[in-house]
């Protein structure tokens, strides 16, 4: 064995001893501080015996964490994610109790609740100590990264395999050209990003844009415009698979199957991905050795973690929860994330109480399971996805696409401009900084592209402003019974009066209320500020004329409502028509940016987006877009969200693309990036650029070895 290898072995042994010593000291300090944790017998022991007991307990706990914890995490994959945090604490505490029972002296003992605390502290301290020692030894740290990269690369992916891998440090295979990491900040609009940079909330992004004064910009910021359906399902399907054709909303009703498609439902996501692949004849953006992390769709990647479209498969290698194992197999990761999970739950409860005490408006309910859902999105999902991206870079994978959903989840309930959402942006910026730091140690250079799939538009809910839901308004316009509370609202009363007038019924309420047959009851679905109305008993898309014959007051009731901006329906005479207040009816083929008609407030491109959606096979019988205030940028969500997206109006339709200047510009000067499908073409072009001739990287000094 050469001198270099002996040095590495001795260095590793020394670090293990140092971690063990620090863990022993931590256990001694905790035994002195916690009354229910003791390392001596009831009659007392000398200091040497106590120290030996602590040393044995710390060593046994560390060994059990290394050997037993990965097996326990395998079992955790069968447990719902929302209870993951509590189980991490329980299992870690159980390992400590087992370690104390294995002590030959039999002196160590702790109350179960105390064991949980002691185990959490010891895991965190051991992890911090090991990381600090490894980082101080630069050579050891670099070698550790390459060993991890080799393990993740797997068999058959070494040198000379035709994968673009060339010789690397220490004789290892290393990729020749740069890879690309795409990080999606879900729901972060272009204007929100700029405001966060200006306020100093995102120093990493500010540095990339050259706003920190430390050097020239390394990235360029480009806004782009979503399709009418401004939501993750449509945008991400288009970005990863090249088409979002026939995705009219986040959820919609398909008459031939009598099913509601929901983009974040595993079966629906799988079907949408299948349709996209069938339409394009291509597997997706990530087919060439890529990785998909935390996304709705796979993009054709072979490496998957937390990907919804494959989560319904029974093949264990494709299970969505399999991505948890790599991260939580380290007990220190598990404890750190679990502690952050619990802290986030209490943070949300505190912020919700503060909002109620301050009587903030608008406001929506944030009780029930929401604190746990938020904690999962902002802590567990973030930690697992970021760790997976880091592993992909260390393995030298050519392309990685990851989605971080934290901001979108918080902004829905706290508002896109709220202090709560701003705090999330700060933490996301730290995740970007971590990814950038790890990229410096990866076996290949990486270009980091940050983008969003949509923004969010603030505003009160439709229910909050008018006292009834869109569904109740539609039912009232159809003459169907609605809850008494909805009937008493101004909107409900007007709708019922319009129905009676259209049916030539007396203004006074009759004893027997008009009740159309149940077969005509519509399916009303909401996707942010976009509403969809379908009549399930009619196998085709109903025309305006058919709707008027069946429900004479419905379209007029909706079009003239102050909370609704416009409707899209099919016309037997004109094809698609846009309806709005005061009897406005304009064929979609006559609308454009110069003659936008009732779409004028919704900005450039609105007419083209509506016209494209009109051609989808599964567009609803009636498409309803809420009112939009172009001055304040507010919409009225048909869901209980004060930050919403899904339709036209405001910041929701203006996401961003932050790309390295080393890549070609997304669009030519003066051009505009429109639609998720065009974003896909840009990302494809960048991946092709990375496959071409590359500027040679600076040579890294090889590790000298003695024979």
Image (cartoon, rainbow, N blue to C red):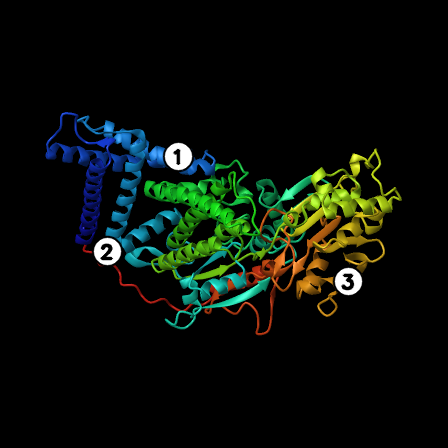
State whether residue 454 is above or below residue 324.
below
Q: Position of residue 680 (x, y in %)?
A: 57, 59
Residue at which label 2 appears: 136
State whether residue 612 is above or below residue 102.
below
Residue 325 occupies quadrant: top left
Query: Looking at the image, is mark 2 or mark 3 earlier in the sequence?
Result: 2
Q: Residues within 10 Å of mark 3 (few under 14, many from 20)?
A: some
Residue at which label 1 appears: 87
Calculate the distance from the C-alpha at mark 1 to the C-alpha at mark 3: 58 Å
Residue at which label 3 appears: 589
**Nearer to me, 507 or 167:** 507
Q: Taking the image as drawn, is residue 226 in sight? A: no
Q: Position of residue 676 (x, y in %)?
A: 60, 58
Q: Position of residue 435 (x, y in %)?
A: 39, 56
Q: Quadrant of the C terminus?
A: bottom left
Calculate the distance from the C-alpha at mark 1 to the C-alpha at mark 2: 34 Å
> Residue extending furthest right?
504
Direction from residue 491 to residue 120 in the image, left or right: left
Q: Residues within 10 Å of mark 2 (few under 14, many from 20)?
A: few
Give SS at disc 3.
helix
Calculate the distance from the C-alpha at mark 2 to the C-alpha at mark 3: 66 Å
> Residue extending furthest bottom?
669
């Amino acid at each position: 064995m050469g001198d270099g290898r002996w040095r590495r072995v001795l260095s590793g042994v020394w670090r293990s001893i140092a971690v063990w010593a620090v863990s022993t000291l931590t256990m001694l300090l905790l035994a002195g501080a916690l009354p229910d944790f003791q390392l001596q017998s009831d009659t007392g022991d000398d200091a040497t015996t106590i120290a030996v007991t602590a040393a044995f307990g710390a060593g046994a706990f560390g060994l059990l964490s290394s050997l037993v914890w990965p097996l326990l995490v395998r079992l955790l994959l069968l447990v719902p994610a929302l209870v993951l945090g509590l189980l991490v604490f329980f299992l870690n505490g159980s390992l400590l109790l087992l370690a104390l029972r294995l002590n030959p002296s039999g002196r160590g003992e702790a109350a179960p609740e105390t064991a949980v605390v002691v185990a959490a502290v010891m895991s965190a301290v051991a992890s911090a100590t090991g990381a600090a020692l490894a980082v101080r030894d630069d050579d050891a740290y670099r070698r550790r990264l390459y060993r991890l990269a080799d393990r993740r690369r797997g068999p058959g992916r070494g040198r000379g395999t035709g994968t673009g891998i060339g010789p690397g440090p220490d004789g290892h295979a290393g990729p020749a050209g740069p890879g690309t990491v795409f990080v999606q900040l879900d729901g972060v609009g272009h204007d929100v990003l700029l405001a966060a940079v200006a306020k100093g909330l995102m120093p990493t992004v500010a540095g990339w844009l050259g706003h920190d004064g430390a050097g020239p910009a390394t990235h360029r910021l480009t806004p782009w415009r979503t399709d009418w359906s401004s939501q993750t399902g449509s945008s991400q399907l288009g970005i990863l698979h090249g088409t979002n054709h026939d995705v009219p909303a986040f959820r919609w009703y398909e008459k031939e199957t009598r099913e509601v498609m929901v983009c974040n439902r595993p079966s629906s996501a799988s079907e949408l991905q299948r349709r996209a692949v069938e339409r394009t004849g291509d597997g997706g953006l990530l087919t060439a050795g890529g990785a998909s992390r935390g996304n709705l769709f796979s993009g054709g990647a072979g490496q998957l973690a937390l990907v919804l479209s494959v989560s319904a498969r029974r093949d264990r290698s494709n299970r969505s929860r399999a991505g948890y194992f790599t991260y939580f197999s380290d007990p220190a990761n598990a404890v750190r994330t679990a502690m952050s999970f619990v802290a986030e739950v209490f943070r949300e409860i505190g912020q919700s109480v503060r909002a109620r005490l301050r009587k903030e408006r608008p406001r929506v309910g944030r009780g029930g399971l929401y604190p746990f859902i938020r904690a999962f999105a902002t802590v567990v999902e973030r930690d697992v996805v970021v760790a997976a991206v880091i592993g992909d870079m260390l393995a030298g994978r050519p392309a990685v696409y990851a989605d971080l959903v934290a901001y979108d989840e918080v902004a829905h309930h706290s508002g896109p401009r709220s202090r709560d959402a701003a705090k999330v942006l700060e933490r996301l910026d730290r995740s970007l900084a971590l990814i950038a730091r790890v990229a410096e140690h990866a076996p290949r250079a990486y270009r980091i592209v940050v983008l969003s799939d949509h923004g969010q538009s603030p505003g009160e809910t439709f229910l909050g402003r008018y006292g009834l839901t869109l569904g109740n308004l539609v039912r009232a316009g159809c003459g169907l019974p609605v809850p008494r509370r909805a009937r008493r609202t101004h909107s409900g009363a007007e709708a019922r009066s319009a129905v009676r007038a259209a049916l030539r019924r007396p203004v006074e309420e009759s004893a027997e209320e008009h009740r159309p047959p149940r077969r005509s009851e519509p399916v009303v679905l909401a996707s942010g500020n976009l509403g969809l109305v379908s009549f399930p008993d009619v196998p085709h898309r109903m025309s305006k004329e058919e709707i008027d014959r069946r429900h004479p007051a419905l379209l007029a009731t909706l079009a003239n409502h102050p909370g609704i901006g416009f409707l899209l329906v099919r016309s037997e005479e004109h094809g698609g028509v846009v309806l709005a207040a005061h009897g406005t009816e304009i064929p979609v083929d006559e609308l454009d940016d110069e003659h936008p008609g009732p779409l004028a407030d919704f900005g450039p491109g609105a007419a083209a987006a509506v016209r494209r959606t009109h051609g989808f096979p599964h567009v609803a019988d009636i498409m309803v877009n809420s009112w939009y205030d172009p001055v304040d940028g507010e919409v009225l969500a048909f869901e209980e969200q004060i930050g919403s997206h899904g339709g036209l109006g405001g910041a929701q339709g203006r996401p961003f693309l932050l790309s390295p200047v080393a890549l070609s510009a997304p669009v030519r000067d003066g051009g505009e990036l429109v639609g998720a499908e065009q974003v896909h073409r840009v990302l494809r072009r960048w991946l092709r650029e990375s496959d071409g001739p590359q500027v040679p990287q600076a040579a890294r000094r090889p590790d000298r070895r003695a024979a």
